[in-house]
Amino acid sequence: MDMSPSTIRPKLTARGVNVFYGDAQALNQVDLDIRAHEVTALIGPSGCGKSTFLRCLNRMNDLIEICRVDGDIRLDGEDIYDPAVNLVYLRARIGMVFQKPNPFPKPIYDNVAYGPKIHGLARSRAEMDEIVASSLERAGLWDEVKDRLDAPATGLSGGQQQRLCIARAIAVRPEVILMDEPCSSLDPIATARIEALMDELRQNFTIVIVTHSMQQAARVSQRTAFFHLGDLVEVGDTDTVFTQPVDPRTESYISGRIG
Amino acid sequence: MTDPRQSPTETILASLPRRRRAEARFHFYGIAAIGIALGFLILLIGAIGHQGIGAFSQTEIALDVTLDESVLDPSGTRDPETLSTANYRAVVRAALGEIFPEAVRKRRDRRKLTALVSIGAGFELRELVLADPGLIGRTMRVWVPADDEVDMLFKGVTVRDSGRFTEKQLGWLDRLEAEGRIRSAFNWRFFSNGDSREPELAGILGAMSGSFFALVTCLALSFPLGVMAAIYLEEFAPRNRWTDLVEININNLAAVPSIVFGLLGLAVFLGFMGLARSAPLVGGMVLALMTLPTIIIVTRASLHAVPPSIREAAIGLGASRMQAMLHHTLPLATPGIMTGTIIGMARALGELAPLIMIGMVAFIVDVPQGLLDPASALPVQVYIWADSPERAFAEKTAAAIIVLLAFLVVMNLTAVILRRRFERRW
């Protein structure tokens, strides 16, 4: 299969995106394409706007009252900031995994079943069981929890909780999964499991991940975008960005001189 | 102060005893503060308990009552109308005459003798007969309440030579006691009667019933209104000058003296809307006004305490804001909301001032049966009894306070238990 950039229609396109928190500008004229079935890593020092950009993609920034987004972001060619867009539908298509594992303080089963339940994706209890089981399986958690689906999710370890959050996100069968530093509160073993998981998941989903760890970006992503002080400095194939960065700022960041 | 040649370790070591002493002093102050507070609490409860415990027992006199048909039902029809208006007082007098034949010859003695027995004795005989008309014509031993002055004497509150009794009366009482016709029994009348001018007949049921109806009204109004207002303000309202203004005013309302709410109720509910005076409905509405700000503030605080990550998780999955709130935020905030509501209700239960303004301080004998019957309330009853001159009302006052405190303790305990039971970690 030809995977060259010119032949792939991007899943998400951002053009001229500016984000303001009150008077402060957090993102400045960002143009970025996210390709389907790839892992795109957003890297950069703290406060560079990478998380802000991620949260623009499923309009989570709408929850922040002082936040204002302008520019053009399209999912499969449709403007997601169109006033006619239904946010519930948008967020069902673009799922999200947060930095800190945030399971609902409910049983494990209910956590995974919540998304399908509110969207009416299961017609029967058996179908729901199937969705829960397959989601947990794909998140690599099934074997650890299959005997205690009624146990509270908050009793799981941090790494398990984060995989549960991934299972919860994929249970809705979104097209894109946004991950905001999903491994930042996890130990190396749990991190490795989640990284392996991302590689499997990209067969079915488009993944955008914000990460502080350049090693992680190098390991899991096909494309890397480097943000600095609200600007998208450089974007390209991960190998290229890490070995032959074009911009001097990128070079100093990946070699550890800034950030 | 510090010797520059000293190493940091030495400086720190030198400061340790001083810090330890400061720590110990601080502990002592804390324990002393708690000790003083507890001491006053024990003193208060002890004093009220000591004074009020007497009201839970009542001196009773045994009479061998002949339910004479010629007195109670001369026509022999057993018509309830006749039976309820018959002269039971005469039956009581006759029974006393049986015991003291020499005393009923003179009219003055007769009156002095009858005064030893409560006026309620006749009422209680009537209840007996109405419940079972077959008793008419029979003679039976009945324990009837003694007059409150006799009650006080036997409880040791007053002394024999206080001038409240004549020598003759004291002699009669001695004879009754010697014959085993005097006992101290549990005062069930205190819990089954409404208010009365006669202390030995006065009960708390009317006030409890009034308080109950007022609190039900208060809860039914303030809980849904308060929770809805809080949810909207916390989760949906935009932050702007108007919502700021609303917020400031809610906080101000929570600090408004309760009597002002009473005035508002008087002007609006009674004056403008023309609702019934002294009704628990209006009392409940006024208490609801008073409780509303508390419930709004507590509910907002509980909603605010739910971590935003939970809300974000739900919204990230495609839940609408309402779904995120109803499915996740609100259930997690429920224990806090319930605790706050119960504490608000407990405050409303003990509130007197606004009820004065809307006329719930009337002397009401009948136990209210509904929201529109004239009623008093527990704190009102305390106030009325505290204001009554009869000696025996002092212990009734204390006993009413005990009942009020018991309800408050039960409510606050419920709040604590609910919080313990539903508190969840996240």
Image (spheres, coloured by chain):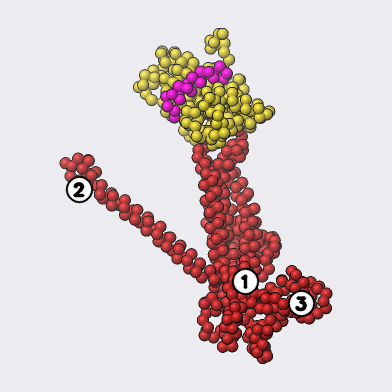
Chain colours: A yellow, B red
Residue farthest to the front, as pictured: B179
Check disc 1 and give the amino acid type.
Ala
Nearest the eye: B245 or B275: B275
Few, some or many residues within 10 Å of mark 1 (<14, 14–19, 20+): many
Q: Kindly identify which residue carries mark 2.
A: B1
Q: CA distance from mark 2 to mark 3?
A: 103 Å
Q: CA distance from mark 2 to mark 1?
A: 75 Å
**Residue A96 spot, x, y in % from top left:** 54, 27
**Pointer 3 chain:** B
Q: Which residues are magenta?
A: A184-205
Q: Principal SS element in the magenta part?
A: helix
Looking at the picture, does residue A226 appear above or below residue B247? above
**Residue B394 spot, x, y in % from top left:** 54, 73
Check disc 2 and give the amino acid type.
Met
Nearest the eye: B365 or B94: B94
Q: Nearer the viewer, mark 2 or mark 1?
A: 1
Residue farthest to the left, as pictured: B5
**Pointer 1 chain:** B
Q: Kindly identify which residue carries mark 1.
A: B202
Q: Is residue A212 visible in this depiction of the protein? A: yes
